[in-house]
């Protein structure tokens, strides 16, 4: 509801503002929407596929408005930092025993409901908040026992050094260091961790090969609860895999086309943000969490704005 109302509010605000930059015809968005329409038809107008497509379309509208009209990105960074600090403060209050948001659930995660979602959220906003906030995130990650936040925070601090050798040396070492983190060894066998995820990926890919061209439909989980192997979570721990399973094999070519044409890594805030978003999307179900849609939309928009400033227009 918040996402829908926010997109409507952005659109209404754009009617009273002057465009700050041009947003020309975009082949990537055109091909994506064609894929979605094809997917709707192949799924026989399944209500879940229709709903997921509408949400995707609203996100595109939101990105269009932000890219075309937003001028003060640094001012928005301050708002995002404030929202992150508010969530951290609320989490600390919950950690001390008072939980005004989910009092009966036992879940502490600020306004994000639980700790994995909070870890994903803090990871996404990290590059916009700079080094002091990263240190806060590392402290919070120890409290909430979310290793993904430790990884992203540490990677972010290394990226800020702009030392390529240090960064490349860090990537293989950190998973080993995580073994010495409290409960770190559970990373390899507990529900939701590596062994379970690998088993889930294997079963998802096997199921996907049954419908490689059409996919299972955007937003539709590839199997029913009764068909999930024992001990495997009823979640695909990869938004990228979920996307490909939903739209079919053509979506894989679309992703390759988008990455090749649009992404070139730099040490800018938006490039680091989009890199972290890509990492999370590959190994977490980040896009499937509605409370993260607004920040995801913002991250993509800021990256496109930076790209627009370098190239003149988005085309």
Image (cartoon, rainbow, N blue to C red):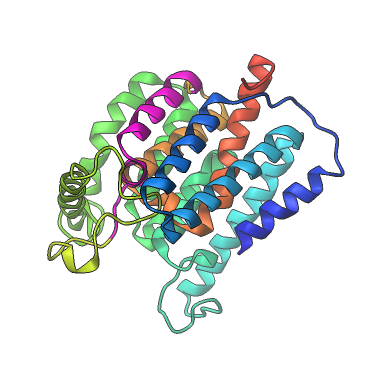
In the image, 159 versus 17, the foreground residue is: 17
Outermost residue to the bottom? 104
Residue 302 in picture, x, y percent from top left: 62, 34
Outermost residue to the left? 230
| Picture residue at 35% right of the left edge, 32% below the top | 250
Assess whether residue 246 is covered by the magenta stretch.
yes
| Picture residue at 49% right of the left edge, 32% below the top | 272
Left or right side of 299 for 178: left
In the image, 297 versus 139, the foreground residue is: 297
Image quadrant for the N terminus?
Answer: bottom right
Residue 213 appearing in the image = yes
- How many marks overall? 0
Left or right side of 239 for 6: right
| Picture residue at 67% right of the left edge, 52% below the top | 7
Q: Is residue 314 above or below residue 296?
A: above
- The majority secondary structure of the magenta stretch comes to helix
Residue 53 in picture, x, y percent from top left: 50, 49
Assess whether residue 140 is covered by the magenta stretch.
no
| Picture residue at 53% right of the left edge, 47% below the top | 56
Left or right side of 247 for 185: left
Residue 298 in picture, x, y percent from top left: 60, 42
Q: Is residue 210 above or below residue 252?
A: below
Residue 300 in picture, x, y percent from top left: 56, 37
Image quadrant for the C terminus?
Answer: top right
Q: Which residues are magenta?
A: 235-262
Residue 129 appearing in the image = no
């Amino acid at each position: 509801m918040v996402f829908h109302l926010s997109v409507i509010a952005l659109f209404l605000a754009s009617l009273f503002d002057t465009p700050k930059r041009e947003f020309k015809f975009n082949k990537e968005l055109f091909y994506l929407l064609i894929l979605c329409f094809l997917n709707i038809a192949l799924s026989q107008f399944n209500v879940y596929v229709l709903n997921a497509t509408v949400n995707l379309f609203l996100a595109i509208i939101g990105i269009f408005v932000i890219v075309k009209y937003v001028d003060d990105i640094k001012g928005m960074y301050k708002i995002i930092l404030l929202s992150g600090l508010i969530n951290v403060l609320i989490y600390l209050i919950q950690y001390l025993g008072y939980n005004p948001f989910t009092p009966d659930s036992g879940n502490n995660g600020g306004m994000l409901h639980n700790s994995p979602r909070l870890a994903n959220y803090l990871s996404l906003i990290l590059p916009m908040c700079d080094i002091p906030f990263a240190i806060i995130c590392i402290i919070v990650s120890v409290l909430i026992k979310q290793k993904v936040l430790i990884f992203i925070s540490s990677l972010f601090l290394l990226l800020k050094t702009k030392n390529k050798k240090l960064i490349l040396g860090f990537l293989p070492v950190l998973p080993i260091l995580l073994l010495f983190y409290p409960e770190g060894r559970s990373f390899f066998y507990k529900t939701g961790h590596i062994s379970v995820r690998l088993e889930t990926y294997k079963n998802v890919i096997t199921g996907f090969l049954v419908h490689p061209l059409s996919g299972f439909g955007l937003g539709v989980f590839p199997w029913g609860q009764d068909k999930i192997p024992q001990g495997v979570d009823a979640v695909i721990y990869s938004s990228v895999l979920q996307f490909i399973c939903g739209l079919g094999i053509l979506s894989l070519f679309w992703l390759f086309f988008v990455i090749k044409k649009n992404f070139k890594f730099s040490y800018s805030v938006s490039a680091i943000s989009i890199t972290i978003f890509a990492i999370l999307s590959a190994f977490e179900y980040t896009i499937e969490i509605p409370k993260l849609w607004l920040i995801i939309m913002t991250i993509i928009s800021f990256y496109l704005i930076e790209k627009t400033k370098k190239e003149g227009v988005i085309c």
